[in-house]
Image (tube, rainbow, N blue to C red):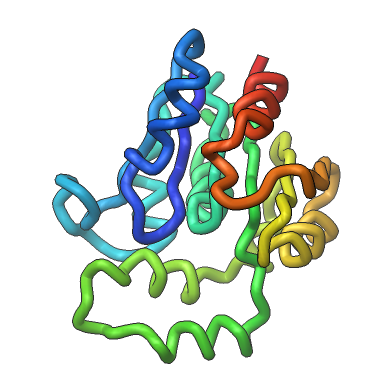
Amino acid sequence: MILFLPPAPHTGAFFDGIRNALSDLNTEAATYPGYGDVPRGIASIEAYAASLLPKDADTIIVGFHTGCLVAVEMALQSQKTGPLILVDVPYFGDEIKTKYAAGLDDNNPEQDAFRAAFAYDTKRALKRLSHELILVATESNLFEPTVKASKEIKGSRLLERRDISKPAFESAAMAELIRTLAV
């Protein structure tokens, strides 16, 4: 099975297009607590991961933007995850995270996942990770952060895909890449 983890502030419906393109495969798309019809809970990457841990040890987890952080945390919380495919990792230093977090409205629940992402210690988490991992850097503003993140993870595999741009998960190239990596 392939589990897709969305970027903030989206629900699992973000992946409807690619899931249709991969309709012959068993796929699911997660929605974080507080988004869509899922009741609000603790807004942290750790809590999101705990609430979404797959029961099947062969589940391939595909994270996009914020979903990358949730995927990493899922792998840290449980060995019952299959390979991770992280697309466009939001790997920012503290200065950038603080700047972005300062622009968020603490009273807006739709920004919970953003606050959670900016509070998450991504560098520490990546250094602790010992999991089969593929990072995909697309033609986006997260190309360089993804390349940088790949250097933090021992044994990770980096795929530079400048042929894939916005909207990345609506491209035939992304569907074919996920199919190739998942089979």
The answer to whether any part of residue 57 appears in the image is: no
Q: Quadrant of residue 114?
A: bottom left
Q: Quadrant of residue 52?
A: top left
Q: Is residue 180 left or right of residue 43?
A: right
Place of residue 60 in the rendered image (x, y in percent of width and height, measured from the top left): 57, 27
Place of residue 2 in the rendered image (x, y in percent of width and height, measured from the top left): 51, 25
- Relative to 121, does residue 154 appear above or below in the rendering? above
Label tally: 0
Q: Please state which of residues 183 and 44 is positioned toward the viewer in this rendering.
A: 183
The residue at 20%/82% (across/down) is 107
The residue at 85%/43% (across/down) is 155
Q: Residue furthest top?
A: 24
Q: Is residue 159 left or right of residue 86?
A: right
- Relative to 153, does residue 178 appear above or below in the rendering? above
Q: Quadrant of residue 92?
A: bottom right
Place of residue 168 in the rendered image (x, y in percent of width and height, measured from the top left): 59, 45
The answer to whether any part of residue 40 appears in the image is: yes
The residue at 39%/43% (across/down) is 14
The residue at 44%/31% (across/down) is 17
Question: Which quadrant is home to the C terminus?
Answer: top right
